[in-house]
Image (cartoon, rainbow, N blue to C red):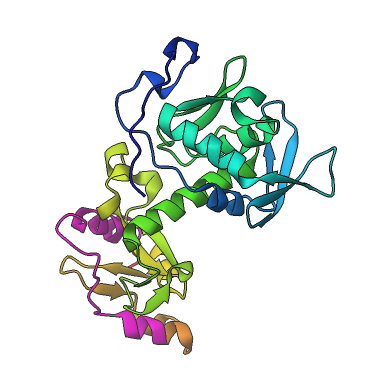
Amino acid sequence: MAMVERSGPADTSERLEGPASRADPLPALPKAVDLLRALIGIDIRTVSGKPNTILAVRGDIVIVRTERSPEGEPVPVSTVQKGLNLLATQGSVRVTPGELGHRSSFVGAVLAVLPGARFTGKPTVVVLGEPPTDDHHNGPVDSTAQVKIRLEQGRLRSRLARGRTSARCVLCGDLFPLDFLVAAHIKKRAACSDDERRDLGNVAMLACTFGCDALYESGWITVDDNGHVRTRPPDEVPQGSMRDRLSRLRGRPCTAYTSSSAPYFEWHRTMIFKA
């Protein structure tokens, strides 16, 4: 998804704070329907702390449960898309019926789960800044942090896939639909500097959920300075699928290895790999 250049609001003095004073591009935002689907079954909180739960997304309608409507009531997806559009172009949006419609509290709660977004001011505004550069979120509930991480992972995976609906795991070489690939950080995200976290094309790789991601993450495999997979000795584990997989992976070329990604793989060999 292309980055959207901010076109400031006509009266910037009415914006309380946030990216409205910045000249740099704002982060690209997901489509409303994708964002809402990522939130299904998770409580999100309005600025007043009231829970809203998305029960389903059906075509152009999202079903939302509130304290007043425990069975859920329909809200047009277009109202959320409008809020996303405003946030993408202005960098901030008022959580008021005049700006977001009569379900403004719900729309504001959805916008606030975006990485880098937060509530501020009175009347309440959602402002969009840089995504967090650590592994923590200061929001009110853990579920919101989980959604932020899920959205960030989805964007990074899409970037690595370059528009494809399927891709090869860089470690085993097998072809998978994107649902079975993760954007694995070559160097653990928590150990990366801010600049390294932004080096998205080199610090992450597509690894499959059929063993490669877990084996790399846990240090059972790594990539050597020639760009080939190294493994712990297969005979260190009982005979079976894990031993077979280690034997198969050993010596394979890793397609994510380049001169630019090499320092991240070196960190993994030194700090994580259990030689």
**Residue shown at the point (48%, 89%) measured from the top left:** 240
Q: Is residue 19 magenta?
A: no
Q: Is residue 103 left or right of residue 128?
A: right
Q: Nearer the viewer, residue 270 or 202?
A: 202
**Bounds of the magenta span?**
244-272
Residue 245: image location, x then y, percent: 40, 83
**Residue shown at the point (54%, 53%) measured from the top left:** 34
Q: Nearer the viewer, residue 219 or 163?
A: 163
Q: Is residue 267 magenta?
A: yes
**Residue shown at the point (45%, 82%) measured from the top left:** 242
Residue 56: image location, x then y, percent: 70, 55
Q: Is residue 115 left or right of residue 234?
A: right
Quadrant where the C terminus lies? Answer: bottom left
Residue 194 occupies quadrant: top left
Q: Is residue 178 left or right of residue 124?
A: left
**Residue shown at the point (43%, 27%) measured from the top left:** 90
Say above or below: 258 vs 96: below
